[in-house]
Image: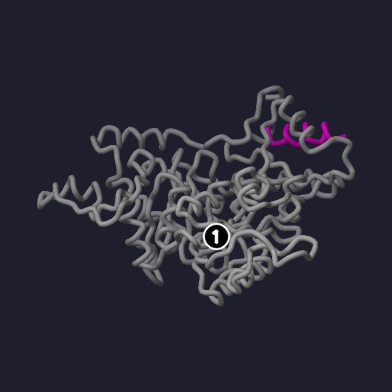
């Protein structure tokens, strides 16, 4: 254990998941079918009641959950359903993974970046509102540098905005929804990190017009690849349901299992191929039943890290709260007190077999967006500052106490 490499992330799966996969393989139906339908219903029940047991409580309003093959697909479908197209703008934080912004470009629209709040990894409501105001006035998205000119960057009608619940920590959705309602733009929650983040108002991902979850291999529950879209508006749900599978008006399961006119279907739109197969859904159903237990394991690891790094001037604990899903443990480095750079510290940790990562490299510094929108690193100073000072430590449910302690010991040793 002292010398064994510790990966940055590892899925927590076992015999129940194996048996679920075998059940599907033996059923003779491998693509989207009964397992996916059951997963959708159980996930909706969880968001309503905190339990996957269907019928545990009557929902206040119908909640539609639609399983997809990735959260990226879900974001694309959500934006398309909201009518986003060429000439539109969609506001996204710069401090996020590329999928949040790239789906905007899929539809010919332009992402407009918003900085995070000081001391926080989350979208700044004040910056969000000032950016919306500029766009609705017909001005360019970003203020002029050095007071010269009217500004620069994209112009266009804001059609939607995508707050990101970074690391499982929910955004200030009350403030964001209030702003969105004033400007009449749709809100799509990027809840890829945020299951099960339960706030006083409900689960993150069910606090806006549409929420999108990820079940990628590193996420809090996993199907290997996959995602879920949660939406209460039936018209939006119907549109997403049709567009996720070729724009066909009937599901595969319906076409192949109904005897009456089973061969006939109509293509009503040129859709996509974004459905979740039953093999993945079966894994997801098992993982969903473990969601609270997996979260408790993550919280215990985070608490051990907090206790080890609190009061140590070299480090800054990550912002957290009672609703935090603890998908990440992004530890801040007080570089002024350290002899090594952030990147050198990462290299030394990796040399000692400790898997670490960085979340995230701000999108406004990426070549594509930098060139396309004439951006500079300092245009979003809070995003840049946080990126330069944060490393993500391993936090996965199967970590043993000795592994957590080794991560702490090695990090403290390399930063002495």
Left or right of 175, for residue 41:
left
- Name the quadrant of the C terminus: top right
> Can residue 141 be seen in this snapshot?
yes
SS under mark 1: loop
Q: Residue at x 65, y 29 (%)?
A: 6
Quick one: which residue is furthest to the front in this view?
149
> Is residue 409 covered in magenta?
yes
Q: Residue at x 59, y 71 (%)?
A: 138
* Nearest the eye: 296 or 173: 173
The image quadrant that residue 236 belongs to is bottom left
Q: Main secondary structure of the magenta part?
A: helix
Quick one: which residue is furthest to the left in this view?
260
Placement of 22 over or under 223, stated as above or below? above
> Is residue 384 covered in magenta?
no
Q: Residue at x 43, y 59 (%)?
A: 230
> Can residue 289 be seen in this snapshot?
no
The image quadrant that residue 415 belongs to is top right
Left or right of 332, for residue 103:
left
Residue 350 rendering spot, x and y as whole percentages: 71, 28
Quick one: which residue is furthest to the top in this view?
3
Left or right of 32, for residue 233:
right
Residue 409 rendering spot, x and y as whole percentages: 78, 33
Q: Residue at x 58, y 36 (%)?
A: 398
- Name the quadrant of the N terminus: top right
Placement of 392 over or under 48, stated as above or below? above
Residue 403 rendering spot, x and y as whole percentages: 68, 32
How many other residues sit within 10 Å of disc 1, few (<14), some (14-19) or many (≥20)? many
Residue 347 rendering spot, x and y as whole percentages: 75, 29
* Nearest the eye: 152 or 322: 152
Placement of 142 over or under 32, stated as above or below? below
In the rendered structure, which segment of residues is drawn in magenta? 403-416
Q: Which residue is mark 1?
A: 162
């Amino acid at each position: 254990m002292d010398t064994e490499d510790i990966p940055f992330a590892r899925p927590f799966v076992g015999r129940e998941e194996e048996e679920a996969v075998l059940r599907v393989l033996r059923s003779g139906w491998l693509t989207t079918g009964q397992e996916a339908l059951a997963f959708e219903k159980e996930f909706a029940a969880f968001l309503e009641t905190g339990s996957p047991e269907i019928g545990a409580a009557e929902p206040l309003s119908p909640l539609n959950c639609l399983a997809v093959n990735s959260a990226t697909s879900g974001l694309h479908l959500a934006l398309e359903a909201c009518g986003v197209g060429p000439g539109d703008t969609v506001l996204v934080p710069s401090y996020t993974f590329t999928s949040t912004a790239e789906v905007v470009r899929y539809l010919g629209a332009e992402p407009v970046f918003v900085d995070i709040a000081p001391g926080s990894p989350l979208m700044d409501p004040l910056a969000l509102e000032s950016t919306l105001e500029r766009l609705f006035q017909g001005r360019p998205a970003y203020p002029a540098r050095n007071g010269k000119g009217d500004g620069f960057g994209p112009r266009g009608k804001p059609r939607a905005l995508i707050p990101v619940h970074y690391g499982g920590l929910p955004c200030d959705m009350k403030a964001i929804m209030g702003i969105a309602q004033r400007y009449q733009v749709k809100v799509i929650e990027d809840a890829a990190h945020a299951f099960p983040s339960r706030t006083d108002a409900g689960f993150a991902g069910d606090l806006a017009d549409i929420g999108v979850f990820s079940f990628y291999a590193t996420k809090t529950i996993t199907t290997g690849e996959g995602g879920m879209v949660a939406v209460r508006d039936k018209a939006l749900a119907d549109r997403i349901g049709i567009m996720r599978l070729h724009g066909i008006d009937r599901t595969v399961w319906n076409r192949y299992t109904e005897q009456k006119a089973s061969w006939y279907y109509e293509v009503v739109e040129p859709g996509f191929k974004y459905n979740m197969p039953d093999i993945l859904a079966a894994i997801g159903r098992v993982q969903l039943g473990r969601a609270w237990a997996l979260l408790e394991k993550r919280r215990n690891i985070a608490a051990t890290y907090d206790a080890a790094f609190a009061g140590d001037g070299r480090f800054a604990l990550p912002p957290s709260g009672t609703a935090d899903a603890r998908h990440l443990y992004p530890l801040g480095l007080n570089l002024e007190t350290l002899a090594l750079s952030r990147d050198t510290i990462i290299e030394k940790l990796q040399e000692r077999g400790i898997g670490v990562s960085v979340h995230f490299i701000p999108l406004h510094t990426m070549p594509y967006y930098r060139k396309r929108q004439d951006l500079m690193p300092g245009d979003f100073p809070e995003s840049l500052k946080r990126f330069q000072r944060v490393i993500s430590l391993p936090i996965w449910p199967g970590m043993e106490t000795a592994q957590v302690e080794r991560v702490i010991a090695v990090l403290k040793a390399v930063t002495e």
